[in-house]
Image (cartoon, grey):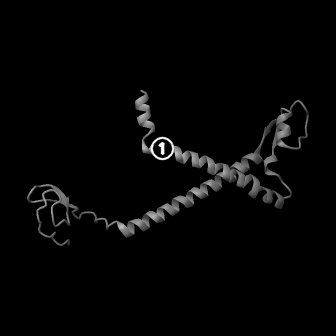
Amino acid sequence: MFAEFRKFIMRGNVMDLAVGFILGAAFTTIVKSLVDDIIMPPLGLLLGRTDFSNLFLVVKEGAQPGPYATLKLAREAGAVTIGYGVFLNAVVAFLIVGFAVFMMVRAMNKMEAKFESQFVKEKPKPGEPTEKKCPHCLATIPYAATRCGHCTSQLETAPAKA
């Protein structure tokens, strides 16, 4: 069983997934800091000196009655709270990560399209033959081949496509 697990874990796609997960976690930490420390403080200042991480509703007061200056103090007092400011920060972080992933996928698609246009031959149109049989060894070979890759026989040139 251990050998089977080792074989599974050493497969390339599992290792790629692990590396992607680790990089994603690191990227998320950076984005969280960007949101909490760079984006939200000026936004809160513009909206009347609001600290979004301390926007909360008290559902039930704790052992020490409120009002509570911060979400942390309310939770320490045992109050039941809804921290909608923390949620708002998380939504902004999610949107930034989503936008970054979108831009990365978009760039990869453009690079892939550029690569295909430079190095990949035209795809045949539907209905056009892509393969033919070698008349000497009967192996399946590309339609435009002039020599068989299996028996190396010289072939007639492919007929012109209509």
Q: Quadrant of residue 148?
A: bottom left
In this view, 149 is above or below 82: below
Residue farthest along the top direction in this orientation: 1
| Residue 60 visible to an observer of this rendering | no
User: Secondary structure beneath disc 1?
Assistant: helix
Q: Position of residue 123 (x, y in %)?
A: 31, 65
| Residue 5 visible to an observer of this rendering | yes
In this view, 29 is above or below 100: above
Q: Would residue 110 be found to the left or right of residue 35 on screen? A: left
Q: Would residue 20 be found to the left or right of residue 6 on screen? A: right
Q: Position of residue 100 (x, y in %)?
A: 60, 58
Q: Would residue 96 be found to the left or right of residue 131 on screen? A: right
In this view, 161 is above or below 73: below
For image coordinates 69% across by 53% down, the residue present is: 92
Under mark 1, the amino acid is Met
Q: Position of residue 28 (x, y in %)?
A: 64, 49
How many callouts does the rendering have?
1
Residue at the spot of label 1: 15
Q: Position of residue 160 (x, y in %)?
A: 18, 73
Q: Quadrant of the N terminus?
A: top left
Judging depth in this view, the residue of 159 and 153 nearest the camera is 153
For image coordinates 11% across by 65% down, the residue present is: 154
Q: Would residue 80 be found to the left or right of residue 123 on screen? A: right
Q: Quadrant of the C terminus?
A: bottom left
